[in-house]
Image (cartoon, rainbow, N blue to C red):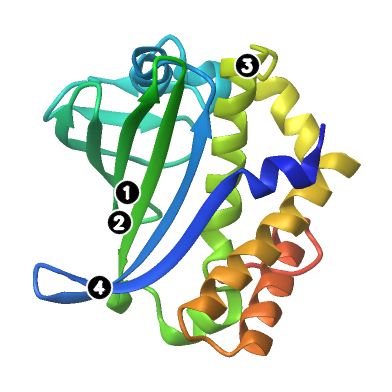
Amino acid sequence: MDIRAQLDAADRGIADGERDGEAVRVQTVARIYPAPIDDVWSALTSAERIPRWFLPVSGDLRLGGRYQLEGNAGGTIEACDAPNSFAATWEYGGGVTWITVRLSALDDERTRVELEHVARVADVPDEIWEQYGPSGTGIGWDQAMLGLDLHLTTGEVTPENASEWVMSDEGLAFMRGSADRWAAAQAANGTDAAVANAAADATYAMYTGQAPGPMG
């Protein structure tokens, strides 16, 4: 796998915003997939296909329904405009954040997918944000975007071989590159580059078992 090409295929952004009168941090990642929009929509929303590139999922995958990703987040589907977008709460560890996924057909065989992840500033203490930055969630989103690409182009990725790959030399290089690119996005939003790079180092160490996470 060309790790650099996979990482460079994604556009990443960090911004400050507001939701329901509260300050939020907005994290976005987007990339273009070589597949028609209906196929990409199916891969993103089908209970049969989601486990083939992401995680096993249960629940009611329709507007207003509840979903649960095995060993990960759950939530409520709050909006759906097939095949253009959907939005849901992202509930994990007692906290609630929000995701919106937007699809744009560039032509008959290419689709741009943008994931937006919004978290209240009040729910992420400044010391945790400064220590880990956007890589804390960004590495996982990059892995998901990669999994979707492999699913759409090769069909090879499954949760079983994905977990093995993550700790391989390729997987570690991908996480390192992802952390560095999220640091660059954080610096572009105004954070001192040294602080952003240190946060990327800390997150990479946490993901690879070299250091305790925020709660450990």
CB atoms of marks 2 and 1 within 8 Å: yes
Badge nearest the viewer, 2 or 1: 2
Quarter-of-image position of residue 197: bottom right
- Whichever of labels 4 and 2 marks the residue nearer the N terminus, that label is 4
Q: Is residue 162 left or right of residue 142?
A: right
Quarter of the image with the N terminus is top right
Badge nearest the viewer, 3 or 1: 3
- Residue, disc 4: 17
- Residue, disc 2: 97
CB atoms of marks 4 and 2 within 8 Å: no
- Tag 3: amino acid: Thr
- Whichever of labels 4 and 3 marks the residue nearer the N terminus, that label is 4
Badge nearest the viewer, 4 or 3: 3
Residue 153 badge: 3
Quarter-of-image position of residue 48: top left
Residue 91 badge: 1
Within-10-Å neighbours for mark 4: few <14, some 14–19, many 20+? some
Give the spatial CA distance, label 1 vs label 4.
20 Å
Residue under the image location 52 percent in, 77 percent down: 188
CB atoms of marks 4 and 3 within 8 Å: no
Residue under the image location 52 percent in, 86 percent down: 191
Badge nearest the viewer, 4 or 2: 4
| Element under disc 2 | strand
Residue under the image location 70 percent in, 66 percent down: 180
- Whichever of labels 1 and 4 marks the residue nearer the N terminus, that label is 4
- Whichever of labels 2 and 3 marks the residue nearer the N terminus, that label is 2
**Where 181 sits versus 151, above or below?**
below
